[in-house]
Image (tube, rainbow, N blue to C red):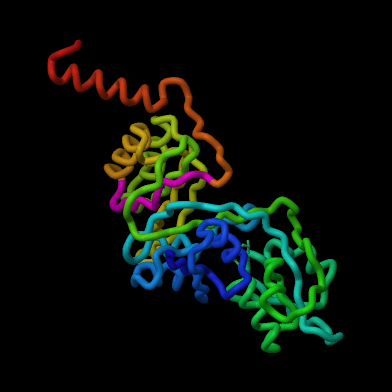
Amino acid sequence: MSRIAYFGPQGTFTEQAARVLAAGDELIPVETVRSAMAAVRKGEADAACVPIENSVEGVVPATLDGLSESTPLVAVAEAILPIHFSVLKRRGDAPIRTVASHPHALAQVREWLEVNLPDAHPVASSSTSAAAVGVLDGEFDAAVCAPVAVEHYDLEVLATEVADVTDAATRFLLVRAPGALPEPTGADRTSVVAAAVNRTGTLAELLTALADRGINLTRLDARPTRNNFGEYRFFIDFEGHVAEPRILDALTALRRHCRNLRFLGSHPRADGTRSTIEPGFGNDDFADAAGWAAAVRKGELA
Ligand SMILES: O=C(O)C(=O)C[C@]1(C(=O)O)C=C[C@@H](O)C=C1
């Protein structure tokens, strides 16, 4: 049985994702995204489950930073969960003056709070479940939580199915130390973080390296390097698997254009969307062309 550290405490959406991604494994709640990844780096866990992006609020910065710092980790699987919240409060009729949650969660229920709890002050907590713990401890009056939180914390449900955007979803990753990669499926995602050289056109060069090989991007984010003001790392997700010739060709091109390139994994997409392959950009096309060039090089073809 593997040990999976997840962004907790118990009852977070991330725990739900870990149950999908690591069914039957031992799940270990930790306080922060960073400590989940640190547990893997220190060998205290075999993998970590962390949120990466939400369809309403965008990326989870702590996850991007955690993936680019310290020793490398690679994503081996992903899950996408629909996100709608329950609002929990302490039992009794005390007025609700503060409502706490993870900033991503608060951003997804802003309109609901304005209409339903207009006098409550929103307070950021480290996770949705940490907010529930804070309500139990008397720190906050209400918490915006994952629906399962009520099974873990003795609180009263004020509202369920709360979401400003009804079809909101969050994508979660299972990350581990580099090792054997998941097999390609035809519906895969590859991720890298690139520190481009600081000169005109370098981001365009990175994107062109992908576009020239017919590779469709699924996400592009920038995070500051923290060292020099104005210097950024680019997180690029794209369709395909490093086992495919066209993806390998693109990665080697990216490597040439970067000061530093970190491979963050190739794994099956949770939504099963197959890679878009334009004519002339298939793996067979790349393999044929490479074979032809090798034969020309040996003087066997012209
Ligand atoms: O706090 C949680 O329950 C989490 O799993 C984190 C998180 C996030 O980081 O976006 C996950 C899903 C929801 O979008 C809100 C919060």
Placement of the N terminus among the 4 image quadrants = bottom left
Q: Is residue 210 magenta?
A: no
The residue sitting at 43% across, 45% down in the picture is: 190
Height in image: 185 above or below 59?
A: above
- Residue sitting farthest toward the bottom: 138
Is residue 233 found left or right of 170 in the rendered image?
left
Ligand 1 shows up in which quadrant of the image? bottom right
The residue sitting at 43% across, 61% down in the picture is: 224
- Residue sitting farthest toward the left: 299
Is residue 265 found left or right of 154 in the rendered image?
left
User: Viewer-proximal residue, 199 or 203?
Assistant: 203
Give the quarter of the image for residue 126: bottom right
Where does residue 45 sit, x and y in percent of width and height? Answer: 40, 69
User: Viewer-proximal residue, 1 or 278?
Assistant: 1
- Residue sitting farthest toward the top: 302
User: Viewer-proximal residue, 194 or 175?
Assistant: 175
Q: Name the chief secondary structure element in magenta.
A: strand
Is residue 198 visible from the viewing direction of this image?
Answer: no
Is residue 277 visible from the viewing direction of this image?
Answer: yes
Give the quarter of the image for residue 121: bottom right
Placement of the C terminus among the 4 image quadrants = top left
Where does residue 250 sit, x and y in percent of width and height? Answer: 35, 37
The residue sitting at 36% across, 64% down in the picture is: 69
The residue sitting at 41% across, 25% down in the picture is: 281
Start-end of magenta stretch: 258-269
Is residue 212 found left or right of 104 in the rendered image?
left
Height in image: 41 above or below 268?
A: below
